[in-house]
Image (cartoon, rainbow, N blue to C red):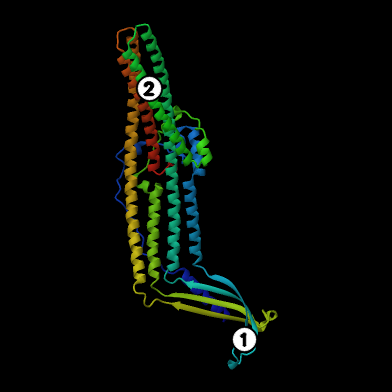
Amino acid sequence: MVRTRASAVAALLAFALGACSLAPRHDAPVPELPAGWNDAALDTASGASAADWWRQFGDPTLDRLIDRALAENLDLALAAARVEEARALLAGSRAEQWPTLDAQADASRQRGAETTGGGQARSLYSVAGVLGYELDLFGRLRSASDAARERLAESVYSSEALRLTVITDVIGAYLDLRTAEHQLAITEDTIAARAAALRLEQARLRLGAGTELTLRQAEAELASARAVAAALRDTVRRSETALGVLTGATPESLIESAPPPGEFSALALPGTLPRMLPSELLARRPDVRAAEAALRASNADIGTARAQAFPRISLTALIGSDALRVGDLFSGPAQGWSLGSALVAPLLDFGRVEAQVAGARARRDQADILYRQTVQTAFAEVRDALTTLREAQAREQARAEAARALERALELSELQYRRGRGLYLDVLVAQRSLLSAQIDQAAAARDARLAAATLFKALGGGWQG
């Protein structure tokens, strides 16, 4: 008889664990994707870079800053805590599918009414173990566990997307810092040259060989260069602050820390691009994966809501001991047991379950739209990043050629002025144009490297398998 009951309980458990789910079948949206990229860069490039793709810039200081940001950034720490929360919720949801075993102990002193024959006070002690289990016949618990699992995946993918964003932001702030420092060094060299030119014009005026107009022009150009330097120093400080925030610096170190050493010229332009198809982008972008996981979770929520309309069956088993004295507990006559079941079914809820199902379906539709939007944004970012990178490289080359031409123009204008064959205005124009071209050249170099980092991010990071 005992074996028969045990077999029946085991069969019920197996049936409950294999219960059907009322969640609708999930068919991931299949967006219309191109067969290939119109830009040849992603079709013909060979080789694959490592997951730590930022090391292609070849700057150890940048590598250290990114490593520090990945370890100390507060946004990433917050995302990691959210992942742990989602993992705990999944564990709790899975635990709901299994039986519970509780220990129960009671002690009471009571006296009944004399009219019912209970006029004498007595004590009652009991100790019992209680086994409880809900038969998940309609998949309510299973659907809730599926939703929790997908939300954990969404949290993990969102954390990875944030990681990519932090890395790219660190690269951008570092490029801003190094570019501003480089531009400031160029400007300070220009200030020194213009200060020397001003002293020369002052001497020429004292000797009667110069004019006050030339002197005032030299003073104006020197003051203008100093104003540019002041703006660049402000950019340097702001970039330092941005790097400090991104790398999780404390308030004290944020205020007092010196800029990390590094050279603008050390920043190489990554040249390795992946060999990949547009369809692979959906599996590589963590934000796309997060949106897809959110869609699956909302689909499972429909099953949870639907199951609310069906009965819930609970099984209970109790074995324990009851006695009037503590010493009699666990003795043969004090032992007892009970088996029971309960069924709870909704009869009249005035549309509550129907509203919950409708709300779950609406949230699923929203998640579907968000997934499609995320895919659309992903392809737009890749196309824009490819275009920006190509044009930024062309702009950097053109700026370099312009700077070289203006260096020679300045040399010629200064030579002609010293020989009395040219005007000082020609020298001033050449100086002003060269300074602007050199600053623009540094900015174009920064833009090309930032465009490369943006392309890495748009493609989902490094291209390790």
Q: Which residue is mark 1?
A: 111
Task: Give residue 297's position: percent from left, percent from top.
Answer: 40, 59
Toward which corner of the image does residue 381 lie, by quadrant?
Answer: top left
Name the residue: 37% across, 22% down: 223
Count the marks: how many? 2
- The answer to whether residue 90 is above or below residue 78 is below
Task: Give residue 25's position: percent from left, percent from top.
Answer: 36, 63
Q: Nearer the viewer, mark 1 or mark 2?
A: 2
Image quarter of the C terminus: top left
Name the residue: 33% across, 62% down: 362
Cβ–Cβ under 8 Å for marks 1 and 2? no
- The answer to whether residue 110 is above or below residue 252 is below
Name the residue: 37% across, 26% down: 439
Amino acid tagged 1: Arg
Task: Give residue 101's position: percent from left, percent from top.
Answer: 56, 71
Amino acid tagged 2: Ala
Towards the viewer: 18 or 389: 389
Q: Answer few, some or many: residues within 10 Å of disc 1's Cα (few below 14, many 20 plus, some between 14 and 19).
A: few
Q: Find the distance from the CA under tag 1 to the CA under tag 2.
A: 101 Å
Towards the viewer: 287 or 237: 237
Q: Secondary structure at mark 2?
A: helix
Q: Answer few, some or many: residues within 10 Å of disc 2's Cα (few below 14, many 20 plus, some between 14 and 19).
A: some
Towards the viewer: 403 or 220: 220
Task: Give residue 387's position: percent from left, percent from top.
Answer: 31, 37
Q: Is residue 390 left or right of residue 234?
A: left
Dot placed on the residue nearer the N-terminal end, 1 or 2: 1
- The answer to whether residue 424 is above or below residue 309 is above
Q: Which residue is mark 2?
A: 223
Towards the viewer: 25 or 305: 305
Q: Is residue 324 left or right of residue 447?
A: right
Asked if residue 379 can be seen in this view, the reply is yes
